Image (tube, rainbow, N blue to C red):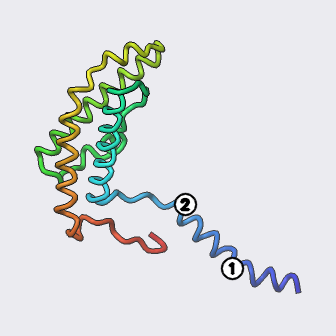
Amino acid sequence: MDSELGRNLLPLIILVLFIVANIFLRRRKAKAPLEIAVGLLSEVKYNQKLVEAIDHRWRGKKMKTGTWEKYKGGLDFLPQPLRDMLAGVFSAAGDFNQQIASARKYKSSSYIMGIDTGRLKEPLAESRRQLEEWVRQNMGRRELWPKRRGLFG
């Protein structure tokens, strides 16, 4: 009786293991343009709030640049002026992060107070406005949406 049960459960166990392995081992597909734009918008909003908070009190947090670093070479779907603006904003964010790292290294909060965040305010606000506008205008375009994924890929 036990061997019959084991024989019947073995194919089921193999199938479950195959499905679990397929889910965890498949490669992550590239994100859709709309997902990338929303990710960039999220980082710009976070960075904008961080700049405003630094003006009022010292927090010592770094700006987010991960989405930009990952997808900066594949943003052809965005207009060229917006790409140029984002390049400038995230370059300045990288410089800001280096200054934060230096201040942390030397444990100097006074060093941070000398960082000019004013030069980031307007470009962050304008890039946010343009990204929000681009997302709003392109929300209806199905080709920019994420592709639907099935069970096996």
Please state the horizontal and vertical placement of residue 150, each as a whole percent of the image. 44, 74
Tell whether 18 sits left or right of 94. Answer: right
Give 82 or 14, whichever is nearer the viewer: 82
Up-down: is 51 above or below 66? above
The residue under label 1 is which amino acid type?
Pro
Please state the horizontal and vertical placement of residue 145, each as a whole percent of the image. 28, 66
Residue occupying image coordinates x 42% and y 30%: 61
Packing grade of label 1 (10 A; few <14, some 14-19, many >=20) is: few
Give 31 or 99, whichever is nearer the viewer: 99
Instruction: Look at mark 2 in the image and give the residue it sits on.
Output: 24
Label 1 sits on a secondary structure element that is helix
Tell whether 135 sits left or right of 146. Answer: left
Q: Which residue extends farthest right?
A: 1
The residue under label 2 is which amino acid type?
Phe
Up-down: is 57 above or below 146? above
> Which of the labelled discs sits on residue 11, or is there none?
1
Residue occupying image coordinates x 33% and y 38%: 49
Tell whether 24 sits left or right of 101. Answer: right
